[in-house]
Image (spheres, rainbow, N blue to C red):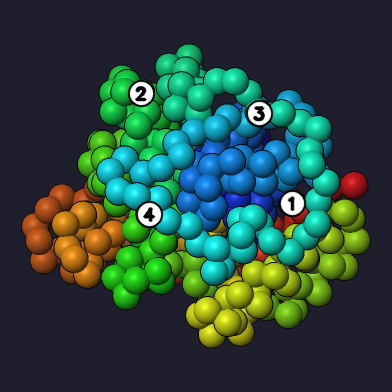
Amino acid sequence: MMKRKIIIDCDPGHDDAIAILVAAAHPGLELLAITTVAGNAELGKTTLNALKVCEIAKLSGVPVARGAGRPLVRDREAASEIHGDSGMDGPILPDPLLRETEEHAVDLIIRMLMESGGDITLVPVGPLTNIAMAIRREPRIVPKIQEIVLMGGGTFGNWTPAAEFNIWADAEAAQVVFGSGAPVTMIGLDATHQALATPEINERIMAIANPVAGFVGELLTFFGKTYKEFFDFDAPPVHDVCSVVYCIDPSVFDCRFLNVTVETRGELSYGMTLVDIHGVTGRPPNATVALGLDHGRLWDIIIGALSRYK
């Protein structure tokens, strides 16, 4: 089976960390690079967290490139209420020996796409700033993108009543991505709120009994507490890893090809993804939208990947 080549663009982040670990271990994927962006925490912290995750997973051959430290237009805001001050509170990890590459994330994305045969999928699971900057700087990459499988958006919000955090954090960048003409798949809250790490799932993860699974268990323990406190969820949803699982097996998700537009001017609706489920606008579809998922198959893939670590 041909491995699907992916670049993960992320802002670790508890669920970002799990996404990286699953992508690195699954035999159906080839993780080419990890790029970082400000989002759950400021850029220095998200980059450090990405390096820590790479170290625990022994990913010395995967470049980690630092990207945008602020949104295209607006001021940066973090999600410390959910992810803690470090962006990945809970587990205690030593400072990594691995170092980031000197190449800027946007330059790396452009270079890898331009050198490719059109077989690289971008998997942005944080704000879309790096992806939008790459598209704006070098529009010739658009035909080279096999697919953009992003985590963000939905028919409802979580950071505001209208908006999901990743889109809200840089709606102007999201507008660029959805309007780029590249194939876009949106794995939003409609699907990811079904990806719950229930107590039964936690038991299966801890039964793996390797250091990576133990680390994931610690991540989910902290994440579960903040999700209960902030959102009153009985079990935390693992949003970002859903985009990685889609790259492994899209049939896990219930998807429709729909028009999605991003609100950038509303006082109360900034960052809203308007998903035209009923076709009332007459605008042509521009995104594959995940509206549901198979919980059992999702976790079988995640746990199977985590079991491959020693």
Q: Secondary structure at mark 3?
A: loop
Name the side, left or right, on which 274 lies relative to 309: left
Q: Which residue is mark 3?
A: 100
**Residue type, mark 2 in image:** Ile
Q: Nearer the viewer, mark 1 or mark 4?
A: 4
Q: Position of residue 288 (x, y in %)?
A: 34, 52
**Residue type, mark 3 in image:** Glu
Position of residue 84 relative to residue 21, above or below, is below
Position of residue 293 relative to residue 115, above or below, is below
How crowded pointer 1 is (Cα within 10 Å; few <14, some 14-19, many 20+) is rated as some
Dot 2 or dot 1, earlier in sequence? 2
Mark number displayed over residue 305 = 1
Q: Position of residue 105 (x, y in %)?
A: 50, 29
Q: Which residue is mark 2?
A: 141
Q: Secondary structure at mark 2?
A: helix
How crowded pointer 2 is (Cα within 10 Å; few <14, some 14-19, many 20+) is rated as many
Q: Which residue is mark 4?
A: 169
Q: Residue at x 54, y 69 (%)?
A: 81
What is the spatial separation of the Cα atoms under label 3 and label 2, in whole angstroms? Answer: 24 Å
Residue 120 versus residue 7: which sits nearer the camera?
Answer: 7
Dot 1 or dot 3, earlier in sequence? 3
Q: Nearer the viewer, mark 3 or mark 2?
A: 3
